Amino acid sequence: MPEGFRLLAGHFDRGAQEALLEDIREVVRAAPLFTPVMPRTGKPFSVRMTSCGPLGWVSDLSGYRYQAAHPETGRAWPAMPESLLALWEEVAPGAPWPEACLVNFYGPGTRMGLHQDRDEADFSVPVVSVSLGATALFRLGGQARKDPTRSMRLASGDVVVLAGASRLAYHGIDRLVPGSSSLVRDDARINLTLRRVT
Ligand code: MD3
Ligand code: FE
């Protein structure tokens, strides 16, 4: 396991998951899910996404970046829910406040290839992730693409803290487990990642 990786299994109980999901529905009403595309090729991601907080992450033909406006509405991203700021304070005490919460929406059949998250300025600040809905088979490697990987399940209510060496670990989502949660309809999954960007 990379140093600094923490899986807080079952951190949020069902009631807290329902409350978080309501917060995210409100975010999505203000900042609709969009389909990012790969820079240069324009190949669509299978995940749909949006963001909340002062900055959001976008990927289009010109590249990947954080920006202050939604790529389709042109409006500022909605505020980060208090519930997520409270989580950050609890699991990343002393870290500077997160500036972006990426909301990834996985329908059945959605995957996310192995990648590193390095569009942020300071890798000493942790990333915090929350999983809601269908269980995902998550793949975690090391800091080099060729490093060995392991697979683990991320279930609804689980929180992952990526601090230390794990902050730059390769990771991805292989697939969802159908029928694993009734929280989100149609066996879908939502993942939230809180990040300091600047
Ligand atoms: C390890 N999200 O948003 S969550 C992403 O389930 C992302 O949607 C996945 O990879 C998802 O970039 C995985 C767990 C996670 C999140 C961020 C990480 C693991 C990470 C950043 C660095 C290392
Ligand atoms: Fe990632």
Image (cartoon, grey):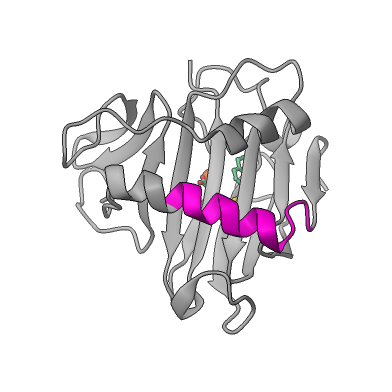
User: What x and y, as percent, mark residue 134?
Assistant: 58, 71
User: What x and y, as percent, mark residue 175?
Assistant: 55, 72
**Closer-to-camera residue (189/58):** 189
* Vertical position of residue 136 compared to residue 145: above or below: below
**Closer-to-camera residue (81/99):** 81
* Direction from residue 113 to residue 39 in the image, left or right: left
Q: Quadrant of residue 139?
A: bottom right
Q: Provide the residue span drawn in magenta.
A: 10-24
- Which residue is situated farthest in the bottom direction here? 179
Q: Residue at x 69, y 51 (%)?
A: 141
Q: Residue at x 65, y 22 (%)?
A: 125
Can residue 57 be seen here? The reply is yes
* Vertical position of residue 34 compared to residue 151: above or below: above
**Closer-to-camera residue (40/74):** 74
* Direction from residue 76 to residue 133 in the image, left or right: right
**Closer-to-camera residue (128/183):** 183
Does the magenta portion include 113?
Answer: no
Q: Residue at x 55, y 41 (%)?
A: 193
Can residue 116 be seen here? The reply is no
User: What x and y, as percent, mark residue 39?
Assistant: 25, 43
Q: Residue at x 60, y 78 (%)?
A: 177
User: What x and y, as percent, mark residue 130?
Assistant: 62, 49
Q: Quadrant of residue 30?
A: top left
* Vertical position of residue 3 compared to residue 177: above or below: above
Q: Name the main secondary structure of what is drawn in magenta.
A: helix
* Vertical position of residue 67 compared to residue 185: above or below: above
Does the magenta portion include 22?
Answer: yes
